[in-house]
Image (tube, helix red, strand yellow):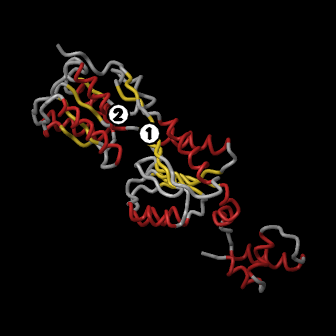
Amino acid sequence: MVTIKDVANESGVAISTVSNVLNNVEVVSEETRKKVLDAVEKLNYVPNMNAKYLKSFKKNTIGLFIPSIQGDFYKMLMQAIHLQCRLRGYLLNIYVSNENTSEEVYSMIISSGVEGAIVLNERLTDQYIDRINQRKMPIVFVDREYTGNQMSSVIIDNAQGAALAMEYLIKQGHRRIGYIHGIENYDDEARFKAYLSVMGKYSLPIDASVILRGYFEEVVAYSEMRVLILKGIQLPDAFFCANDEMAWGCIRALTEAGIKVPEQVSIMGFDDNTLAPYYSPSITTIHSPVTELGNSSAIELIRLMQLLEPEKGTIQKLSPSLVIRDSCEFRV
């Protein structure tokens, strides 16, 4: 890769002179300017705009570090954060860190050059969070409960939402209830713990054969449900799915096998994505306040960034709500 140093060597001037030419600083003679531009053209040099912008805008740039940009959850989160940044005069850079290790995510955050960060990445361990904390970088986490100097959390109360879902299913007369896991992260862990807690509260049996893992993806949940049906395992009264995409995958598999939803098996989702009302049957689910999550996390981060003196952050828990539609039915 051609660097600014290569351009300086080719044109016989200092690196600072090349920088002045590229940034149109009027302290360079026309002859020197031409030599530099000729060298740029000859070497096909492309300036590192990221470095330029990071240097210029570090003091009003926020970084959003997320594992994916696919799906309603991430899109709604990004839109809400971007809106708050725009309203308050901040730039937003988005960094996707899907398969990165904890150390790589840490390095990505530190080397990004942003003034503050909103982080949703379960791979980032406490060890590396402590190292970020030592750098006094303002952070808001949206996937864990954590506070530190200039570090806050804004989270959806997953346990409360899952408990709402389970209480509703049980009050509908369901006793044998299966669970569809997402990936192994904070959200799924909190939802599954609440599932177990409510089942225990009512002394209901937990059958491991109807606890599946769909990785938060429709196609995986569909496949897992197909396998369960083909094995001939007795289906439960209902399934509680850790998100709506998996709920729809389960509904498709059951329907294709001639099993009626909700007449024979009820399906409960989580998140209330934009398609949930339009599936057939429409999905009874837990509404996650994702837009509020994005708004609140951006506002809290900007508050931390504007503090004159560092202070310990806060934890905000946002309450989900039950949305009753057609995929669950009362059992006599």
Towards the viewer: 214 or 58: 58
Point 68% across, 65% down: residue: 55
Q: x and y percent of residue 105 in the render?
A: 45, 62
Quadrant housing the C terminus: top left
Q: Indicate the amino acid at tag 1.
A: Lys
For disc 2, the marked residue is: 160
Element carrying mark 2:
helix
Q: Is residue 45 left or right of residue 285?
A: right
Callouts 2 and 1 close, C-beta under 8 Å = yes
Quadrant location of residue 194?
top left
Q: Residues within 10 Å of mark 2 (few under 14, many from 20)?
A: some
For disc 1, the marked residue is: 317
Q: Residue furthest top?
A: 332
Of callouts 2 and 1, the N-terminal one: 2
* Image position of 257 with respect to 190: above or below: above
Element carrying mark 1:
strand
* Image position of 12 with respect to 303: above or below: below
Q: Is residue 261 left or right of residue 312?
A: left
Q: How much space separates mark 2 and mark 1, taking CA atoms?
A: 10 Å
Q: x and y percent of residue 250 in the render?
A: 26, 32
Point 55% across, 66% down: residue: 111
Q: Indicate the amino acid at tag 2.
A: Gln
Quadrant location of residue 238?
top left
Point 79% across, 78% down: residue: 17
